[in-house]
């Protein structure tokens, strides 16, 4: 049983959480439940962080933004349709989350894992319930007594027939067996119940990660659309400046280098536009794959999610909620409990066990000439010598229990770290948004003044080109800061647990 609950999901926000995987299967055997010592096994996703590279020339001073890269089961989905819709499909954040939770492959895999864990629990329960069976036997038989050694020569004075039969009889009988007292089986069953609880919490944590993946992808598309609009504006500005330089050259009041310099700036902005448009198209394909749409379906986001400070929650409140609601922490706690019961089941092998078995039926040559018979058996068994197997089982269970407790303690610390990091990013991004907003206004004013000076012949095109680059950088910083702020909200929602409810609250705007 691993304490982690999600595998290859590469998601947002620097170092946000630890890896988690679903508990392993509970073996339906009479021996004590043995829990694997290693808590690191593969399952549908893993969370990592990488910085989001920007097209050349658009590098931002923002150091918070991380990319949202989803891999493994969470990157795929079961498509709800194969038919493309035209025009572009309107998509709100709520609708994207609904579709992601319904069609994302990571969630579907965990639904199947729950069914498997429940089946294993019922297998363990069956060992505690009566086992009832019924048999109807018809026999037609002939026996050679000579072959068995019964002859007249063997027993003087006796006259044995060579062959007996054929004769026939029938036997209609029902039997029941029941484990009356077996602590190992009982504790195994209770461990199976805890294992099922852990799997259900793992599935809930998978839902939180799907919410984060879909929200992060939605925010990335918003950011990419803003970048496209910004670069388009820069292309228009560069085009106007280039035309202005050409007009001045034709009038004989500007040198050719001004035209060349502004043309280079125009083509640079056009290259940037191609890059950001291509990036936007790929992000939409990734979103389609996340939420069960055909990969070629064009979408039109309907939620802009502008800047809105988050003041409704404090760090202490967030930590309290995280400890209470983080599904992976609850799963780790259930795994500790399962390991404790498995250890108790291993020790219980030294105790006596009691079983009961009985049957009742009728037997005779035919139903009209038959008689009832029965058998009742009670067995008390105690292990006396097993060659050290019980001690080895206990030692193995102890190691698994220590591992589970260590993983739980580590995960509890990871939860606090997740919340604190999300708060740091949230506060830093909010400050960056304020500074970036002021900087983009100043950059726009600088560009306007530079263009006026160039038109008046006071300066050359170099000052205008530099001002255009400053505007582009200021716009990119603002877009990146706004994206980081919303992404920090999403990260905080996941860090606190119950991500689907918290996301809607944190990203709501007046």
Image: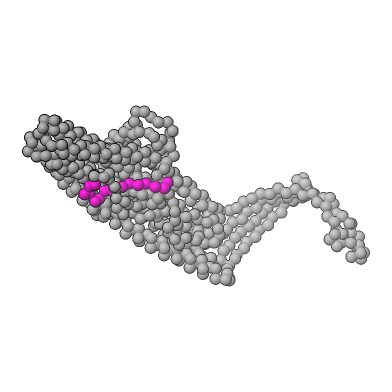
Quarter of the picture containing the N terminus is bottom left
The quadrant where residue 400 appears: bottom left
* Quarter of the image where one finds residue 3: bottom left
Asked if one can make out residue 243 in the rendered structure from this viewpoint, the answer is: yes
Foreground: 263 or 507?
Answer: 263
Farthest top residue in view? 87
Residue positioned 86% across, 61% down in the render: 150
Q: Give the magenta part as a residue range.
A: 59-73
Q: Is residue 309 visible?
A: no
Q: Colour scheme used in the picture?
A: one colour
In terms of image quadrants, where is residue 57? top left
* Residue at image coords 45%, 62%: 37
* Residue at 73%, 49% in the rendered image: 137
- Quick check: is 69 in the magenta stretch? yes
- Above-or-below relation of 150 to 295: below
Which percent across, then down, holds residue 472? 20, 41
Q: Looking at the picture, how far across and down is residue 19, in whole percent?
A: 38, 54
Camera-nearest residue between 244 and 194: 244
- Front residue of 185 and 75: 75
Name the side, left or right, on which 308 lies relative to 499.
left
Residue at image location 68% in from the left, 57% down from the top: 375
Give whichever of 320, 223 is nearer the camera. 223
């Amino acid at each position: 049983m691993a304490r982690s609950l999600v595998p290859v999901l590469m998601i947002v926000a620097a170092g946000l959480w630890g890896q988690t995987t679903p508990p392993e299967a509970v073996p339906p055997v009479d021996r004590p439940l043995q829990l694997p010592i290693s808590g690191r096994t593969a399952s549908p996703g893993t969370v990592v962080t990488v910085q989001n590279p920007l097209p050349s020339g658009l590098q931002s001073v923002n150091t918070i933004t991380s990319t949202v890269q989803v891999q493994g089961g969470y990157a795929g989905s079961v498509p709800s349709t194969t038919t493309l819709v035209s025009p572009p499909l309107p998509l709100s954040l709520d609708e994207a989350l609904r579709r992601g939770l319904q069609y994302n492959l990571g969630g579907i895999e965990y639904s199947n894992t729950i069914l498997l864990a429940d089946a294993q629990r019922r297998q363990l329960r069956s060992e505690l319930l009566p086992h009832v069976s019924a048999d109807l036997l018809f026999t037609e038989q002939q026996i050679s007594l000579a072959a068995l050694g019964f002859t007249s020569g063997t027993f003087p004075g006796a006259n044995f027939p060579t062959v007996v039969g054929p004769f026939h009889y029938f036997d209609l009988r029902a039997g029941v067996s029941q484990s009356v007292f077996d602590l190992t089986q009982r504790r195994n069953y209770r461990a199976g119940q805890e294992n099922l609880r852990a799997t259900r919490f793992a599935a809930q944590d998978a839902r939180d990660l799907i919410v984060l993946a879909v929200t992060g992808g939605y925010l990335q598309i918003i950011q990419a659309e803003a970048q496209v609009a910004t670069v388009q504006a820069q292309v228009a500005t560069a085009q106007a400046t280039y035309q202005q330089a050409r007009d001045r050259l034709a009038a004989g009041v500007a040198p050719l280098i001004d035209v060349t310099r502004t043309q280079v700036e125009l083509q640079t902005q056009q290259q940037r536009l191609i890059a950001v448009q291509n990036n936007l198209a790929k992000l939409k394909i990734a979103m389609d794959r996340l939420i069960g749409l055909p990969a070629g379906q064009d979408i039109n986001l309907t939620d802009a999610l502008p800047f809105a400070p988050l003041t409704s929650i404090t760090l202490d409140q967030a930590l309290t909620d995280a400890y209470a609601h983080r599904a992976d922490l609850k799963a780790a706690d259930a795994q500790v409990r399962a390991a404790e019961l498995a250890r108790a089941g291993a020790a219980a092998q030294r105790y006596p066990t009691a079983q009961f078995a009985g049957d009742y039926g009728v037997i005779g040559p035919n139903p009209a000439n038959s008689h009832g018979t029965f058998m009742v058996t009670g067995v008390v068994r105690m292990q006396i010598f097993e060659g050290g197997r019980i001690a080895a089982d206990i030692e193995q269970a102890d190691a698994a229990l220590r591992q589970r407790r260590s993983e739980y303690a580590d995960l509890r610390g990871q939860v606090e770290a997740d919340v604190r990091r999300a708060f740091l990013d949230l506060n830093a991004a909010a400050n960056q948004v304020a500074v970036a907003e002021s900087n983009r206004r100043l950059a726009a004013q600088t560009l306007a003044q530079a263009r006026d000076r160039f038109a008046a012949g006071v300066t050359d095109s170099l000052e205008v080109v530099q001002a255009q680059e400053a505007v582009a950088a200021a716009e990119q910083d603002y877009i990146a800061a706004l994206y980081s702020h919303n992404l920090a909200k999403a990260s905080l929602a996941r860090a606190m647990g119950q991500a689907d409810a918290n996301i809607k609250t944190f990203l709501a705007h007046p």
